[in-house]
Image (spheres, rainbow, N blue to C red):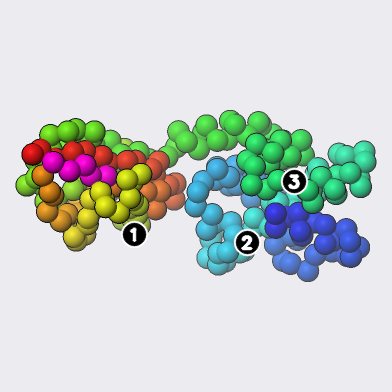
């Protein structure tokens, strides 16, 4: 959306964008594209928009450039320029399939977007196990007071995130205190409030957990029922 606005403003005003991201992007297109290909399907957008210049490019908001460049490529290959502009304005930005069609038609990226999405999902760290709890179990002991989660990759110990499960706040596993990550960064422990008997509990280990490469965790629903 921001790239469309940037590109169409240039066309309407017949002048170059004053935003530094555009000129910087033109001079560093290959590097930016390579990095963006790795993260375009990530739920974490802080490397690309509404961020600071404290990143590997030393330039903030480079998503403006990526979107702009996609639009420029789309416009350049279109024989009907007015139709191309109309399509950009009327594109359903809440429809991922329509966005993918638009981006692929632009030819900006070398491969179909589903390949980037598959590669990204494969690269994400995952929850491998939880100490003392078999996920989906219906006979968990009520005396468990620590939740230890094991990950498939080394995690960045600065970040963590939990969310309610489908059953909401009433059935959430309540975190009492943060006990810390293991030395290898592949597990984390939290104290939890006392479990009630014969109750179903849930908590989502969220994508706010990220690995040391900045790749977010595949969200994982912990769910179990305690014994009577």
Percent across and percent down for residue 126 are: 35, 38
Q: Is residue 156 visible?
A: no
Drawn side of residue 99 relative to residue 115, left or right: right
In the rendered image, residue 5 lying in the magenta stretch gets the answer no
Drawn side of residue 130 relative to residue 87, left or right: left
Percent across and percent down for residue 184 are: 24, 47
Residue 15, quarter of the rendered image: bottom right
The residue lying at 62 percent from left, 61 percent from top is 61
Q: Is residue 202 above or below residue 193?
A: above
Query: Which residue, given by chain and number where applicable, does mark 3 sit on?
Result: 91
For the residues labelled 3 and 1, say whether their Cβ atoms are less than 8 Å apart: no
From the viewer's perspective, is the residue at label 3 or at label 1 nearer? 3
Q: Earlier in the sequence, mark 1 or mark 2?
A: 2
Bounds of the magenta span? 198-202
From the viewer's perspective, is the residue at label 2 or at label 3 nearer? 3
Secondary element type, mark 2:
loop
For the residues labelled 1 and 2, say whether their Cβ atoms are less than 8 Å apart: no
Query: Which residue, given by chain and number where applicable, does mark 1 sit on?
Result: 158
The residue lying at 50 percent from left, 38 percent from top is 120
Q: Earlier in the sequence, mark 3 or mark 1?
A: 3
Front in this rendered view, residue 79 or 163: 163
Percent across and percent down for residue 208 are: 39, 53
Q: Is residue 92 visible?
A: yes
Magenta segment main secondary structure = strand
Secondary element type, mark 3:
loop
Please tell me how crowded label 3 is: few (under 14), some (14-19), or many (20+) other residues with Cα within 10 Å.
Answer: some
What is the CA distance from the residue labelled 3 to the residue labelled 1?
38 Å
Drawn side of residue 63 relative to residue 107, left or right: left
Query: Which residue, given by chain and number where applicable, does mark 2 sit on?
Result: 61
Percent across and percent down for residue 22 are: 74, 60
What is the CA distance from the residue labelled 2 to the residue labelled 3?
22 Å
For the residues labelled 2 and 3, say whether their Cβ atoms are less than 8 Å apart: no
């Amino acid at each position: 959306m921001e790239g469309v606005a940037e590109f169409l403003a240039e066309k309407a005003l017949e002048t170059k964008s004053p935003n530094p991201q555009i000129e910087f992007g033109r001079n560093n297109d290959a590097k930016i594209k390579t990095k963006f290909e790795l993260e375009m399907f990530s739920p974490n957008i802080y490397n690309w928009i509404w961020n600071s210049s404290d990143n590997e490019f030393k330039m903030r908001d480079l998503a403006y450039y990526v979107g702009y460049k996609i639009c420029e490529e789309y416009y350049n290959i279109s024989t009907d320029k007015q139709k191309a502009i109309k399509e950009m304005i009327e594109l359903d930005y809440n429809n991922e399939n329509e966005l993918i069609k638009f981006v692929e038609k632009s030819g900006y990226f070398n491969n179909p977007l589903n390949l980037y999405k598959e590669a990204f999902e494969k690269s994400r760290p995952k929850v491998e196990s939880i100490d003392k709890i078999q996920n989906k179990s219906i006979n968990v002991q009520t005396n468990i007071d620590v939740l230890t989660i094991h990950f498939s990759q080394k995690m960045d110990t600065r970040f963590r995130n939990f969310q309610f499960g489908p059953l909401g706040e009433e059935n959430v596993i309540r975190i009492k205190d943060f006990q810390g990550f293991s030395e290898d960064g592949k597990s984390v422990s939290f104290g939890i409030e006392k479990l009630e008997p014969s109750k179903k509990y849930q908590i989502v280990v969220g994508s706010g957990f990220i690995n040391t490469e900045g790749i977010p965790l595949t969200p994982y629903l912990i769910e179990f029922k305690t014994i009577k």
